[in-house]
Image: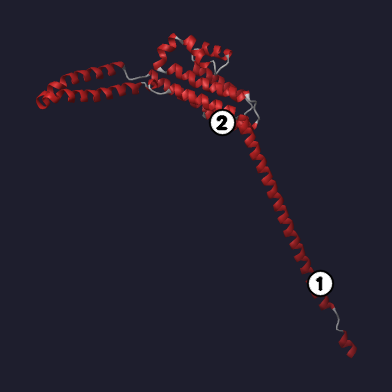
């Protein structure tokens, strides 16, 4: 989803075709589903025995036949899909900032995949788990003998409750060692695929809304500039009127000082 959020605005900006975002979404969805199938211990046996039939049934609606054939021929399928995503980013017409962020997201995928593989392939040693289970069984088997003097007949339900609690804690610890078996990975992959297909289908609608908003913004800016020019023009006319008035007053004062006093000369 992070990789898709980085790619979708760029596709809208350069008016990508309708099929291009759908193919990109299909590859991303195929990566998540393929990783889940390869690293879910609950499906490991079924995947190994029914791989040739189960994989096409799972991915035939996501990938094209030639893409599915190449994917099945690769030894490490999640890395193969990540390599395809890197090639798509490299061959696209994306500018440097967006390409850098998408490369970061692909690197994030690879780091997450490596972390999950280390969790799966580096569990708690089996001898430790067996030793803990054996010790717990022996302790629970001897516990009723210690409770007989104090509990008598209530020893049975008390021992059952204590055994249920301790064995439950031990089972939780075993599941935490390999969490992929209890996580709803299939539902997560289906949710990712559904969201990506929905976002790819909404590409034309997103382009229309973005164009509409940009057009409205252009009209608002144009009107604002027109109002600003009109305001500047009205202020310029007022300034010219004030300047003309001041010039007229100054000329009138100069004329009054320059006019000779003819009444005095006639008297002499």
In the picture as drawn, the residue positioned furthest to the left comes out as: 149
Q: State the mark number for residue 6.
A: 2
Residue shown at the point (31%, 18%) measured from the top left = 125
Label 2: how many Cα within 10 Å (few below 14, some 14–19, many 20+): some
Q: Position of residue 67 (x, y in %)?
A: 57, 15
Residue 51: image x %, image y %? 47, 10
Residue 94 found in image quarter: top right
Left or right relative to 76: residue 41 = left
Q: Nearer the viewer, residue 166 or 243?
A: 166
Dot 1 lies on which element? helix
Looking at the rendering, in which quadrant would you find the C terminus? bottom right
Q: Nearer the viewer, residue 252 or 157?
A: 157
Quarter of the rendering containing residue 98: top right
Residue at 50%, 25% in the rendered image:
192
Q: Is residue 245 above or below residue 193?
A: below
Where residue 22 appears, as percent x and y from the top left, is: 59, 23
In the depicted structure, whether residue 156 falls above or below residue 259? above
Q: Which residue in the protein does label 1 denote? A: 251
| Local SS, label 2 | helix
Who comes first in sequence, dot 2 or dot 1? 2
Question: What residue appears at the point 55 percent right and 21 percent down from the top-left corner?
Answer: 27
Nearer the observer: mark 2 or 1; the answer is 2
Residue 5 at x, y = what percent? 55, 31
């Amino acid at each position: 989803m992070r990789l898709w959020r980085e790619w979708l605005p760029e596709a809208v900006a350069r008016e990508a075709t309708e099929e291009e975002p759908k193919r990109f979404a299909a590859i991303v969805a195929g990566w998540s589903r393929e990783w889940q199938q390869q690293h879910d211990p609950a499906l490991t046996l079924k995947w190994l025995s029914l791989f040739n039939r189960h994989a096409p049934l799972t991915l035939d609606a996501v990938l094209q036949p030639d893409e599915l054939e190449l994917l099945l021929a690769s030894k490490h399928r999640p890395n193969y899909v990540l390599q395809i995503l890197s090639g798509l980013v490299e061959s696209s017409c994306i500018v440097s900032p967006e390409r850098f962020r998408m490369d970061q997201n692909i690197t994030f995928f690879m780091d997450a995949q490596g972390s999950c593989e280390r969790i799966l392939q580096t569990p708690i040693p089996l001898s430790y788990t067996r030793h803990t289970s054996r010790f717990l069984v022996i302790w629970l088997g001897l516990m009723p003998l210690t409770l007989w003097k104090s509990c008598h007949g209530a020893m049975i339900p008390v021992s059952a409750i204590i055994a249920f609690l301790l064995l439950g804690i031990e089972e939780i610890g075993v599941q935490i060692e390999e969490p992929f078996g209890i996580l709803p990975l299939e539902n997560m992959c289906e949710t990712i695929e559904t969201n990506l297909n929905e976002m790819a289908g909404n590409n034309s609608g997103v382009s229309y809304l973005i164009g509409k908003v940009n057009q409205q913004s252009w009209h608002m800016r144009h009107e604002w500039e027109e109002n600003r020019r009109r305001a500047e023009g009205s202020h310029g006319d007022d300034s010219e009127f004030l300047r003309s008035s001041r010039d007229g007053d100054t000329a009138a004062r100069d004329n009054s000082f320059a006019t000779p006093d003819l009444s005095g000369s006639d008297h002499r």
